[in-house]
Amino acid sequence: MSTTGERAFFEPTARSRAKAAIEAIEAQTSAEIVVALRNASGDYRAADWLSGAIVALASLVAMLYLPWTFALHFIVVDVVLAFAVGALASVTIGPWRRLLTPARVRAANVRAAACQAFVDRGVGRTRGRSGVLVFVGVFERTVEVVGDVAIDPQGLAGFDASVAELRAAVQATSLERFLAALATLGPVLAARFPHGDDDVNELPDEVEAPKSGA
């Protein structure tokens, strides 16, 4: 199994290891951890259209300035085909699509998708209001951590450092680094929310990810 690259996060073995990491964290703390994966957190068609327009414009400029004569109908067909090729390139080439999408748009999409997943997974319904969602936007190469009302990052020593390392791991598309960063949440949360004998597992430990990886 590859432990680097975007697809590594969606492999069954990777998700099993993440589940084991969640179980190890929750053996230390009464807080509940939920991990959700998304290949893309939003609609990036605007980048696809922009890519198509760039390639179409480049094709038109080339035909206008090359030292050859092109029939008018050929120019029209070529521009249309160039647009289609450019749009398809954006859909299939992640780095190019990311380059054409402003960072603020990617960040806003991940944040919105994370908040929606927080509600959908019921992370806010634990009795101690100490649920924590770790939302991974693989295409966006970032992580959004959403905590319930009892989770105050300023009152949890090391929490921000753990989140920063999670983000760095996903940015590097390193599964091993991500799992190691995830494990650091255990002692961080345990300091404020120690595990008790009466603790029950209130939320599923399985990593949520679309079967298609989309």
Image (cartoon, helix red, strand yellow):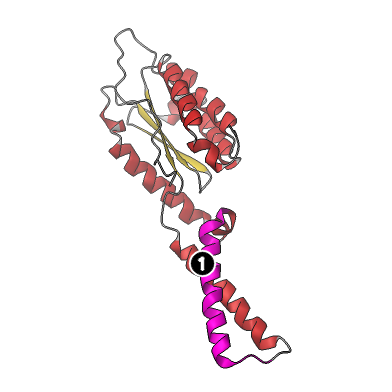
**Segment tinted magenta in the rendering:** 69-94
Which structural element holds mark 1?
Answer: helix
Q: Amino acid at mark 1?
A: Ala
Q: Say which of 28 and 62 sits in front.
A: 62
Q: Position of residue 109 (x, y in %)?
A: 42, 51
**Would you identify the image quadrant in which residue 176 lies?**
top right
Q: Position of residue 83 (x, y in %)?
A: 53, 73
- Look at the image and tell me whether residue 198 can be seen: yes
- Look at the image and tell me whether residue 51 can be seen: no
* Residue located at (48% from left, 37% from top): 10
Residue that badge 1 annotates = 87
Please say if 68 is above or below 81: below
In the image, taking residue 48 as reference, residue 132 lies left or right, namely left
**Dominant secondary structure (helix, strand or loop) of the stretch shown in magenta:** helix
* Residue located at (43% from left, 25% from top): 19
* Residue located at (51% from left, 67% from top): 87
